[in-house]
Image: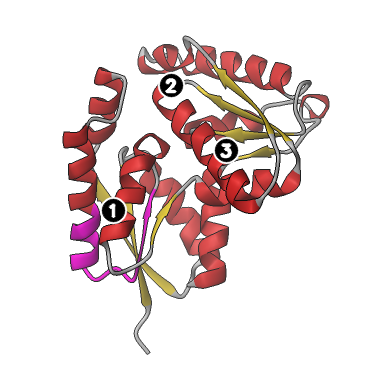
Amino acid sequence: MEKSKLGLLHTSATLVPIFERLCKEELPGVAVFNLVDDSLIKDVIAHGQLRPITARRVVQHVAAAEDAGADFIMVTCSSIGAAVETAATLASVPVLRVDQPMADRAVAMAPRIGVIATLPTTLEPTADLIRRRAAAAGRAINLTARLCEGAFDALMSGDAAQHDAMVAAALRELATQVDVVALAQASMARVVDTLAAEDRRVPILASPPLAVEYLSTIL
């Protein structure tokens, strides 16, 4: 029997090995291929928003993944989530935002939810998704969105240690105010592993493992 085929669309090549490892562990019977276009996220950051011309290109990439034979498509960047939802209405195979399983898990776990990001262009799409998933589930939530200002610039300038320290400090503070924290960017997940046990007083959710775990239940 032919394997199911999963198409992954990334806006950074750094995410390819992360998802390859997760898929190898969780989806051993699924054939996985990757499409990468980092100009998408660069355009979003440069303009501070997802422009219609960029959203149209996301839709085209999703169509290309379907043409390549994907039975299921996942887009691994939260900043272009709105375009992913549009693409899903035009595709004849299922299309998933990487942060949807995380949003659903957070909504199911607790009413006081924190969302943290280093980019405003990622923070608001994920926060908006959590609010909409909560409404769809009929759950009342109290959402606290926190932008870790300066951390992304530190990372881009090559100071990963400063980025990690700023994210860790923001996580420690946010954990005192909410019942669960959702990371709006997959790049922040490595910081969680550096936190002391007392600083991880609430669950901290990252989208990649939860998304692949979700795919393992349906593929």
Q: Is residue 52 magenta?
A: no
Q: Between disc 2 and disc 1, whose residue precedes? A: 1
Crowding around mark 2 (Cα neighbors within 10 Å: few <14, some 14 to 19, many 20+) is many
Q: Would you name the residue on which mark 3 appears?
A: 131
Percent across and percent down for residue 201 are 81, 30
Report helix, strand or loop for mark 1: helix
Percent across and percent down for residue 186 are 49, 37
Q: Which residue is drawn at 70% across and 40% down?
A: 140
Report helix, strand or loop for mark 2: loop
Q: Between disc 1 and disc 3, whose residue precedes? A: 1
Quadrant that contains the N terminus: bottom left
Note whether 93 is above or below 96 in the view shown: below
Percent across and percent down for residue 56 are 18, 43
Query: Do labels 2 and 1 touch, CB within 8 Å?
Result: no
Q: Quadrant of residue 193?
A: top right
- The boundaries of the magenta stretch are 62-75
Q: Would you name the residue on which mark 1 appears?
A: 87
Numbered mark located on residue 119 in the image? 2
Q: Nearer the viewer, mark 2 or mark 3?
A: 3
Spatial separation of the CA atoms under disc 2 and disc 1: 23 Å
Crowding around mark 1 (Cα neighbors within 10 Å: few <14, some 14 to 19, many 20+) is many
